[in-house]
Image: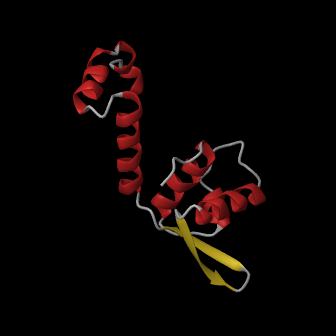
Amino acid sequence: MKPLTRAEEEIMQILWEIERGFVKDILTPMTEPKPAYNTVSTIVRILERKGFVSHKSYGKSHEYFPIVSKDEYRSFIIKKMLDGYFENSFGKLTDFFKSDETLNTKSYQ
């Protein structure tokens, strides 16, 4: 598994929420300015090639659904972050969160 780009992750967040949908269903909840229909379609096909998404065909239309769960991806990202930034130490991660004042402000709540 590889990390997703920001655009891919935005689409996956929507698919995890709606569970399955056509490109128009993915596009609807996206924030303004919304990308073009063809852009979303291209990104979904890239996600499919990467093994995150599959589809069911209805003639020329495709209904997409995630095949990697949000929990699986979250676990992968946390492990990657631990390895890359905290020497695989959960203790170092928690120490970081405890000591970083910018993360302890109410603006993130």
Quarter of the image that includes the C terminus: top left
**Vertical placement of residue 22 versus 16, above or below:** below
Q: Position of residue 27 (x, y in %)?
A: 65, 57
Query: Given the current orientation, which residue lies at the most extreme bottom position?
Result: 59
Q: Residue at x 30, y 34 (%)?
A: 88
Q: Residue at x 59, y 51 (%)?
A: 8
- Front residue of this view, candidates 61 and 75: 75
**Vertical placement of residue 62 versus 36, above or below:** below
Query: In the displayed structure, does residue 65 sit left or right of residue 59?
Result: left
- Front residue of this view, candidates 101 and 17: 101
The total of numbered circles placed on residues is 0
Query: In the displayed structure, does residue 61 sit left or right of residue 6?
Result: right
Query: Given the current orientation, which residue lies at the most extreme left position?
Result: 91
- Front residue of this view, candidates 88 and 103: 88
Q: Quadrant of residue 79?
A: top left
Query: In the displayed structure, does residue 94 sit left or right of residue 21?
Result: left
Q: Position of residue 31 (x, y in %)?
A: 63, 44
Q: Residue at x 36, y 18 (%)?
A: 105
Q: Position of residue 64 (x, y in %)?
A: 58, 70
Query: In the displayed structure, does residue 46 sit left or right of residue 1?
Result: right
**Vertical placement of residue 43 versus 106, above or below:** below
Q: Position of residue 80 (x, y in %)?
A: 40, 41
- Front residue of this view, candidates 6 and 77: 77
